[in-house]
Each structure stands twice: as structure tokens, then as C-alpha cells.
Amino acid sequence: MSDRLLSLLTAKLIDQCGGLAEASAACAQLARPYSVPQLSRCQTVGSGNFLPLDILAALEGYCGEPVISRTLAERVSVPVEDGKLAELACAFNEQAGDVQRHLRAALADNRLSPREIKQGFAEIEEARAALDRTAAALQAADKGA
């Protein structure tokens, strides 16, 4: 997973927790103190800072969605079983639809906020990962033919 994607997913996770202040409070309650500046550095592309695992688990538990860990798990390379190529292609199409829905909603006011831009990049990276999985399955099928 690229540093850029990890930072964008961290920003998405923090946003889903209610923002930096609320996420910091959740860390203190569920794991350990983790300041707003620390969290901010973790969501900044190119900072080289990333969430520690205990903080990641606390924030994902707080917001109720495995924003980062789901993407990490999806990136693990596993053999594709027979009949799974169609499912992967459908999953890619659904992810691409998520990109379209997000951008359409974000552009409803003819402006993009920094948060909407970050979210757009995160949605595109998720769709790209789904496309990569589909291409890998297709390539595996080609080698098996």
C-alpha cells in the first residue's frame, strides 16, 4: 500500500470519527492519549507518519468501520478460486460506482472542499485496488488456460 493511500485512508478514518479533536478523545478513551497534532501528521500525505496499530484499532472501533484494515486485508495476494473472476469484476464496478457517487455528490455545489478531494482520492485508490485484483485473477486464468 502506498504512503499516499495510507495517509488518505487515515484522513477518511479521522473524518468518520468526527474530526481530529473527537478522534483524539476517542484514542485517549479507548487506547492511550494521542494528540490532535499527532493525528494530523498521520493524515498528511508525505509526512512519513502513520497510525500505530493500537490507535488504528481504537479509531476503527470508535467509528465502527475497518477503513484502513479492510484495505490492507484486500491488498493481501491470495489465489483466486474458480468462478471468482466475475465476483471480482463486479466488485471493481461497484467501487468505480462509489467514485462516481462521491464526485457527483461533492460537485453538487460546484465546489470541492479539501475533505472531498481527499475522499475522492481514497475512493479512486480503492477502485484501483479492486481493478488490480480483477486483473490479477484474469492473468492467473490466462496462465491456467
Image (spheres, rainbow, N blue to C red):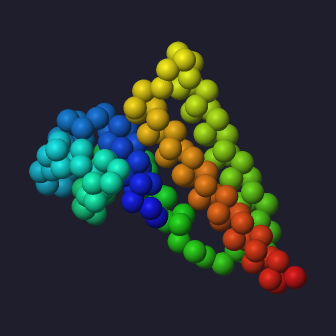
- Left or right, 56 with respect to 64, comes to left
Residue at the far top in the pictured view: 109
Q: Position of residue 97 (x, y in %)?
A: 67, 40
Residue shown at 27% from the left, 54% from the top: 47
Task: Give the quadrant of the C terminus.
Answer: bottom right
Residue 110 vertical position relative to residue 6 in the rendered view, above or below: above
Residue 85 vertical position relative to residue 144 in the rendered view, above or below: above
Residue 98 vertical position relative to residue 88 in the rendered view, above or below: above
- Left or right, 16 with respect to 134, comes to left
Q: In the rendered image, which quarter is residue 51 located in?
A: bottom left
Is residue 49 at all visible to an observer of this figure? yes
Residue shown at 61% from the left, 76% from the top: 78
Is residue 84 at all visible to an observer of this figure? no
Q: In the rendered image, which quarter is residue 101 located in?
A: top right
Residue shown at 31% from the left, 34% from the top: 18
Q: In the rendered image, which quarter is residue 11 located in?
A: top left
Q: Position of residue 110 (x, y in %)?
A: 54, 17
Depth check, front residue: 66 or 124 = 124
Residue at the far right in the pictured view: 145
Q: Position of residue 67 (x, y in %)?
A: 43, 51
Residue at the far bottom in the pictured view: 144
Q: Position of residue 1 (x, y in %)?
A: 46, 64
